[in-house]
């Protein structure tokens, strides 16, 4: 018998939807800027892509601040506290399940319950993207908007060039996260049940 748990409060759902839409705009305009030039537009005209990217970057910083405060001041934050003891084994068990057990109809090793919203792999990837990748994307993104604050040279290489390269690598990591996130999200109770959860707030156990 499956049970339902209210795991996604309204503020998480609003933050997540805003975050998803802004990230999609940032990815499209980011790629457009990367692979086009002022005379040759890829998806969006270069100058327009720059403008949209900047506005979405600023809005994403605002929505991220909402996420940070939400996790600091509500119980949602406890899902991001990871227990390091035995983590390797738990990650292995979850990885094995995603790669093999799931397709053999085995039971999930860390099913959703009242206390547990994320399995260990979700926990590690959400912590990685929310507390490491996105903050560094913001710092490098804001620096590129105000390049006068960037070091002229670092170890003989242009500071702006290095910041830009770092920003692009972080952007690619976010794209990779998104693909994996979307795929893994289909591996819930049914292929659509996790997507339903992030809209309604209610999550079904396996
Ligand atoms: C079209 C875009 C997206 C879709 C359809 C989507 C889908 C989902 C779904 C179904 C869940 C609930 C299942 C779960 O908890 O794992 C979820 C949660 C989550 N997603 Fe996404 N996602 C998208 C974009 C993103 C992006 C761009 C990020 C971060 C850069 C992100 C970060 C998260 C986080 C951190 C959670 C857990 C939130 C919490 O409960 O605290 N998602 N997403």
Image: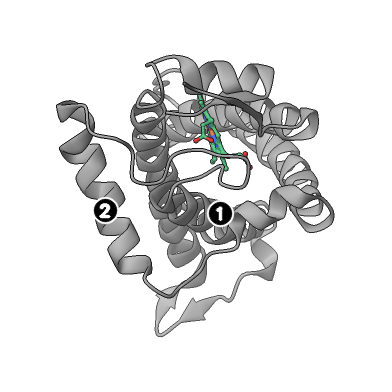
* Tag of residue 93: 2
Tag 2, which secondary structure? helix
Residue 15, percent from left and from top: 72, 33
Lateral position of residue 121 relative to residue 94, left or right: right
Q: Residues within 10 Å of mark 1 (few under 14, many from 20)?
A: many
Lateral position of residue 66 relative to residue 96, left or right: right
Q: Residue furthest front?
A: 1
- Answer whether labels 2 and 1 touch (C-beta < 8 Å): no
- The response on whether ligand 1 sits within 8 Å of label 2 is no
Q: Residues within 10 Å of mark 2 (few under 14, many from 20)?
A: some
Disc count in the image? 2
Q: Is residue 13 above or below residue 196?
A: below
Q: Is residue 175 above or below residue 126?
A: above
Q: Is 144 or 90 nearer to us in this picture?
A: 90
Q: Is residue 12 above or below residue 198?
A: below
Q: Residue at x 42, y 75 (%)?
A: 85
Q: Residue at x 56, y 24 (%)?
A: 3
Residue 162, percent from left and from top: 44, 66
Q: Residue furthest bottom?
A: 155
Q: Residue at x 59, y 34 (%)?
A: 50
Q: Residue at x 65, y 31 (%)?
A: 16
Tag 1, which secondary structure? helix
Q: CA distance from mark 2 to mark 1?
A: 31 Å
* Tag of residue 137: 1
- The response on whether ligand 1 sits within 8 Å of label 1 is no
Q: Which is nearer the N-term, disc 2 or disc 1?
A: 2
Look at the image and tell me whether residue 144 can be seen: no
Q: Is residue 31 above or below residue 62?
A: above
Give the quarter the ligand 1 occupies: top right
Q: Is 198 or 54 nearer to us in this picture?
A: 198
Q: Quadrant of residue 19?
A: top right
Q: Give the foreground label among 2 and 1.
A: 2
């Amino acid at each position: 018998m499956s049970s339902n748990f209210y795991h996604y409060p309204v503020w998480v759902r609003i933050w997540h939807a805003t975050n998803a839409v802004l990230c999609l705009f940032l990815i499209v305009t980011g790629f457009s800027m990367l692979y086009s030039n002022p005379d040759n537009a890829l998806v969006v005209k270069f100058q327009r892509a720059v403008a949209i990217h900047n506005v979405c970057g600023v809005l994403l910083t605002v929505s991220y601040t909402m996420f940070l405060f939400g996790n600091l001041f509500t119980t949602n934050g406890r899902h991001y506290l990871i227990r390091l003891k035995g983590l390797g084994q738990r990650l292995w068990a979850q990885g094995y399940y995603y790669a093999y057990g799931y397709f053999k109809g085995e039971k999930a090793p860390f099913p959703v319950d009242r206390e547990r919203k994320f399995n260990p792999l979700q926990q590690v990837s959400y912590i990685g993207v929310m507390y490491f990748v996105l903050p560094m994307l913001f710092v490098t993104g804001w620096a590129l908007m105000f390049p006068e604050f960037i070091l002229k040279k670092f170890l003989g290489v242009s500071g702006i060039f290095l910041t830009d390269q770092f920003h692009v690598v972080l952007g690619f990591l976010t794209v990779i996260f998104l693909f994996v996130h979307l795929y893994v999200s289909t591996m819930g109770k049914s292929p659509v049940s996790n997507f339903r959860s992030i809209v309604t707030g209610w999550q079904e156990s396996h």
